[in-house]
Image (cartoon, helix red, strand yellow):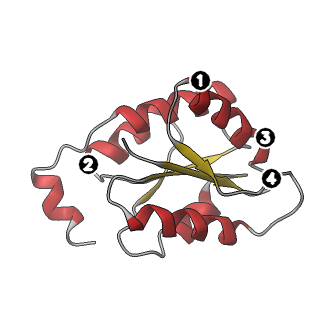
Amino acid sequence: MKKIFISSDHAGFKLKETIKDYLNNKKFNFEDLGPMDDSSVDYPDYAHKVAKKVKLNKSNIGILVCGSGTGMNIAANKHKNVRAAQCFNIKSTKLSRLHNDANIITLGSRLISKKNAIRFISIFLNTKFDGGRHLKRIKKI
């Protein structure tokens, strides 16, 4: 089974803890890469930690949470073979997996509810890449 790596910055810390409860309840194999409290931190440091773990193994998945989801997304996408997707609704989440084979989901704690965050995580983890014509495009990234 895939390994999930999760991290946040201070703005995303509380939502990260909610997501961890969901992952625990569903018996997912995951590792929290920090931070361990809501003290101020620099989001790129944590995005890079997750991206490095995700790119080590094709089956690894990442979850990143910051205030908007944007900063984490930008930082994570600096890594080769990482396809981070900022998800803000059901359709963007499904398409990130179906068409883009995204391997990291980024969420904005100030922009989405806890309920929607859990819904998007579930969709992200359970949606498979369509391949086909989309694989050709992924290879061009």
Is 7 situated left or right of 122 in this image?
right
Instruction: Tell which circle, 4 or 1, labels the residue nearer the N-terminal end.
Output: 1
Crowd class of label 4 (few under 14; some 14 to 19; many from 20; radius 10 Å): few
Q: Give SS at disc 1.
A: helix
Image quadrant where one finds the C terminus: bottom left
Q: Which residue is mark 3?
A: 14
Report, in whole angstroms, how far the alpha carbon at label 3 lies from the one at label 2. Answer: 30 Å
Instruction: Tell which circle, 1 or 2, labels the residue nearer the N-terminal end.
Output: 1
Q: Give SS at disc 3.
A: helix
Q: Residue flagged by tag 3: what amino acid is it?
A: Lys
Q: Which residue is mark 1?
A: 25
Report, in whole angstroms, how far the alpha carbon at label 1 lies from the one at label 3. Answer: 17 Å
Residue at x 33% of width, y 42% of height: 95
Residue 124 visible in the displayed image: yes
Marks 4 and 2: which is nearer the front? Answer: 4
Instruction: Tell which circle, 3 or 4, labels the residue nearer the N-terminal end.
Output: 3
Residue at x 10% of width, y 50% of height: 132
Q: Residue flagged by tag 1: what amino acid is it?
A: Asn
Residue 36 percent location from the top left of the image: 80, 52
Residue at x 66% of width, y 71% of height: 44
Q: Is residue 97 above or below residue 138?
A: above
Residue 108 percent location from the top left of the image: 65, 47
Q: Is residue 1 above or below residue 52?
A: above
Report, in whole angstroms, how far the alpha carbon at label 4 lies from the one at label 1. Answer: 20 Å
Marks counted in the figure total 4
Crowd class of label 2 (few under 14; some 14 to 19; many from 20; radius 10 Å): some
Instruction: Tell which circle, 4 or 2, labels the residue nearer the N-terminal end.
Output: 4
Q: Which residue is mark 2?
A: 99
The disc at residue 36 is 4
Instruction: Tell which circle, 1 or 3, labels the residue nearer the N-terminal end.
Output: 3
